[in-house]
Amino acid sequence: MRRQRLADMLGGGDRQSIGKSNHVAKLVLSQPRRFAELVGLLWDEDPLVRMRAADAAEKITVKRPELLRPHKRELLGLLTEAEQIELRWHLAAMVPRLELSTAQGRRAAEALQRYLEDRSSIVKTFAMQGLVDLARHDPALRETAKQTLEGALRTGTPAMKARARKLAQTFTS
């Protein structure tokens, strides 16, 4: 039996659907060697494939963050250049799962600070979460994360305010 390409499983349909990304996540968790194929799809020409590949990769790396390790350079580069909203919010969740040097963590934090200017409140919310996650590993980022939370509490959407309140409780304790 011929192995089906992940791109074929992730394409089609509309932007309002995650398509078969849950199926792909389950498949790749059972066949981790295919994670590199999935990561490669973050640059696919089809925005639906990119979006769903990012969704599947983010779900996989909640359970298996070590799968990100070989792709660190590419993901850090994509974090700074990604324009697609769905790609940005999944990258904001994934990149803090990487083992980053101090310099890499600070570059990631700079990219996430730029995400706070995104038109999408989901991107902003995930960027805020990512900054807090990075600050847990780098005390020098704590003040930036704290200011971000305070700003979200003042001017964020209701969802951002709710997430900022939750993060502030766990972050300052």
Image: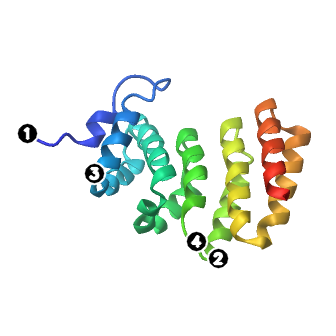
Q: Give the number of the mark in front: 2 or 1.
A: 1
Q: Residue at x 54, y 42 (%)?
A: 84
The local secondary structure at tag 4 comes to: loop
Q: Which residue is mark 1?
A: 1
The local secondary structure at tag 3 comes to: loop
Q: Amino acid at mark 2?
A: Ala
Q: Which residue is mark 3?
A: 31
Q: Residue at x 38, y 38 (%)?
A: 49
> Which label belongs to residue 59?
none
Q: Amino acid at mark 3?
A: Gln
Q: Amino acid at mark 1?
A: Met
In depth, the one of 112 and 82 nearer the eye is 112
Q: Is residue 3 left or right of residue 104?
A: left
- Distance Cα–Cα, label 4 vs label 3: 26 Å
> Which label belongs to residue 103?
2
Pointers 1 and 4 in contact (CB under 8 A)?
A: no
- Distance Cα–Cα, label 3 vs label 2: 33 Å
> Which label belongs to residue 100?
4
